[in-house]
Image (cartoon, helix red, strand yellow):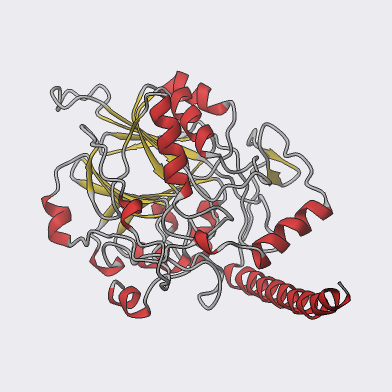
Amino acid sequence: MKRSAGHSFPRLRRACRTALFSGALLVSACLLSAAKTNLPVAGYPASPQAAEGRFRNPAPKPADGVLKTLGIIWNVLLNKPDTTVPKGSVPVDALTRADLDAAPDRSLFRLGHSTMLIKLRGGYFITDPVFAERASPVQWMGPRRFHAPPIALKDLPPLRGVILSHDHYDHLDRATVLQLAKTTDVFLAPLGVGDRLIAWGVDAAKVRQFDWWEGTSIDGVEFTATPSQHFSGRGLFDGNKTLWASWVIVDGADDADAPDHGTLRLFFSGDTGYFDGFKEIGRRFGPFDVTLLETGAYDAQWPYVHMQPEQTVQAHEDLRGRWLLPVHNGTFDLAMHGWQEPFERVLAFGERRGIALTTPRMGERLDLSAPHTATRWWREVDTVTAGALLPERGFEAAQ
């Protein structure tokens, strides 16, 4: 017993040094990010979501406590299982500009995590575009992609619009936004997120900002920012200075020019915990043809800001959805669960509830008017032999 205890102290010291070093790097990265961002927070005191200079959720967040917070950090830094990243290659269907141009309207291509490219009315819209190698303030540390994007950023067609849910690094990538700003007509953002874009150098004339239940129409497609239960911030001192939102997208409502095309209703959740707002959104805008709902990066210790897969299915039912496309998975290691677990859990629970669920591969075309179940592609990935997250060459080739 004495020998075992003696050996445990060096391990404990190494663990503490690792935790302190990782924490110092993270703090430095956040400070560097805050300095680069220089966000001029305008403040939105008239917003029902604002109080004392910050945004908030309708249901107050339960207090975590110092010990719980430290425990979460300790687990993330030192106790991650090796199942949180794939050991083999994630299948990706490579895309070209010609593929996108040939795709019919109402096509969706999942590019990774919460980044979806959607073709409506001959124009292209993209959600939460992240083409960076890492979801991090800096590109030399932080969660690294499992796979390269199906199409290089430079090969994307000009975009009619970019749809943003909030400002976290796995949803809002500064380098990607600045590149897209050269060829994008409109950026749709929650309050304050648009101010961040303008501070980065995006033309203010291209930026439109919305509170919950506000929206706009582009080429006959209606976009409405709707509630979600989450938080925001990119540095140490800007927590909840910008709003977070989900989005309702409606194509073809009362469209006399396309009477045979029918109305298409989509819901994009962004990041959110489960809350009563799904029922209200479903009441106002449902039923939805396809719901793009967060299913990943969850943990039992943070139920307030992310959904368990079973809650994703419940949210889909609250929204009165027909087809469920689980997103926010398969690209970044952001939690303690196995990387395949979100797919398996949402699939199993969805089948028990009779939910039509589609799981297209990254880059595979999905017909939003008539979705298909697609393959259970994550089961094809080799999880036995060791492998890297993403070969440097493969990632760089996609840029």
Q: Residue at x 47, y 55 (%)?
A: 339
x and y percent of residue 20 in the render?
Answer: 75, 75
336 displayed left or right of 292? right
x and y percent of residue 115 in the render?
Answer: 38, 53
3 displayed left or right of 380? right
Q: Quadrant of residue 183?
A: bottom left
Q: Is residue 268 visible?
A: no
Determine the residue located farthest toward the right in the rendered image. 2
Determine the residue located farthest toward the front in the rendered image. 1
Q: Quadrant of residue 304?
A: top right
Q: In front: 139, or 49?
A: 139
x and y percent of residue 71 in the render?
Answer: 76, 57
Q: Quadrant of residue 205?
A: bottom left
| Image quarter hosting the C terminus | bottom left
x and y percent of residue 121 in the render?
Answer: 20, 40
Q: How many marks?
A: 0
198 displayed left or right of 125? right
Seen in the picture, residue 253 relative to 225 is either above or below; the reply is above
